[in-house]
Amino acid sequence: MARTPADLVRADPGPPFEITFDGRTVTALPGQSVAAALWAAGILAWRTTRHGGRPRGAFCGIGQCYDCLATVNGTPNRRACLVPARPGDAITTQEGHGRAGLAV
């Protein structure tokens, strides 16, 4: 029987909860970042670049590169690798600079 990383460190993270990504339900675990929850669900990109619209997701995973920017609960430009996932969070793909729908 294959063991998971959680089994290997005897982690007991608590019951999973749901967040949404572009309306799709994603399961997250307590202590996971938004990026980790999206990765675990097979979602690798949640932002497009300002020029060219190229997909981006987590790159460094420690909050230094800004590739993982996402819109979290309506707030753009959140670093998904640093934001803890919370029950009911609504994550949406961030297009460009993330301010297209905001009154400036």
Image: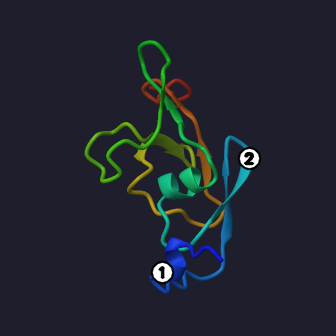
- Element assignment for label 2: strand
Q: Position of residue 85 (x, y in %)?
A: 53, 62
Inspect the image, locate mark 1, and give the three-letter code of the amino acid beneath it: Leu
Mark 1 or 2, nearer chain start: 1
Instruction: Give residue 30's position: percent from left, percent from top.
Output: 54, 74
Mark 2 surroundings within 10 Å by alpha-carbon count, few (fewer than 14), some (14 through 19), many (20 or more): few
Q: Quadrant of residue 37?
A: bottom right
The dot on residue 55 is none
- List the residue tagged with mark 1: 8
Residue reaching furthest to the left: 64
Amino acid at dot 2: Arg
Dividing the image into 4 quarters, which one contains the C terminus? Answer: top left
The residue labelled by disc 2 is 24
The quarter of the picture where the N terminus appears is: bottom right
In depth, the one of 41 and 83 nearer the eye is 41
Q: From what the image shows, is residue 19 above or below residue 59?
A: below
Question: What residue is shown at x 56% (from left), y 73% (from top)?
Answer: 4
- The answer to which of 26 and 75 lies nearer the viewer is 26
